[in-house]
Image (spheres, rainbow, N blue to C red):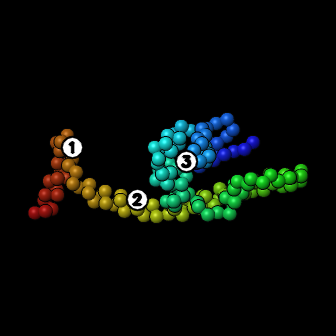
Amino acid sequence: MRLEKCWFCSSTIYPGHGIQFVRNDCKVFRFCRSKCHKNFKMKRNPRKVKWTKAYRRLHGKDMTQDSTFEFERKRNRPERYDRITAENTLKAIKKIDKVRENREARHHEKRMKGNKAKKLKQNKKELEDINLIEAPKSLINVPSIEVQQQSQENMEE
């Protein structure tokens, strides 16, 4: 079973799915869904469309260089396997997937590291601007608030 990659978004295309477009120079473009095909026909650049893999890699959202990607590389030459090699390969695939998940998690943590400081700074700024907001008219007539307002006025004098 051959799994292809979408030319536009780089997602996996399973057999019997997707659309093929063959250009006049015999170049074959495979698309996973009509969304990718329509964007291709509109001559959109996948590196500028935010939901594509190319955009995410270009802008540092996904990992770009990792040795585990070497295993996904397309090979055109068929190789002969024996049973032992196939078993070892299947065991190795599980380990490689685990390694890739760990690396992606570390990459995500590293990428999100500065967000806490940014959010904290933004929240502090929001609290500074909160005194610009007026209280609702219904709260102005509440006696407990009037007492507090009077005590503040006395302190100011």
Residue 82 point in image, percent of width and height: 89, 52
Mark 1: which amino acid?
Pro
**Label 1–label 2 contact, CB within 8 A:** no
Label located before the other in sequence (3 or 1): 3
Task: Say which residue appears at 21% left-offset and 54% top-offset.
Answer: 132
Relative height, residue 117 to residue 140 (above, below): below
Category of crowding for the residue at label 3, using alpha-carbon neighbours closer than 10 angstroms: few (below 14), some (14–19), many (at least 20): many
Frontmost of labels 3 and 1 is 3
Q: Between residue 138 and residue 61, name the one nearer to us.
A: 61
Provide the secondary structure element on which disc 3 rests.
loop
Residue 115 point in image, percent of width and height: 45, 61
What number is the disc on residue 12?
Answer: none
Q: Is residue 19 left or right of residue 139?
A: right
Label located before the other in sequence (2 or 3): 3
Task: Please name the residue that numbered disc 3 is placed on.
Answer: 8
Task: Please name the residue that numbered disc 2 is placed on.
Answer: 119
Mark 2: which amino acid?
Lys
Quadrant housing residue 67? bottom right
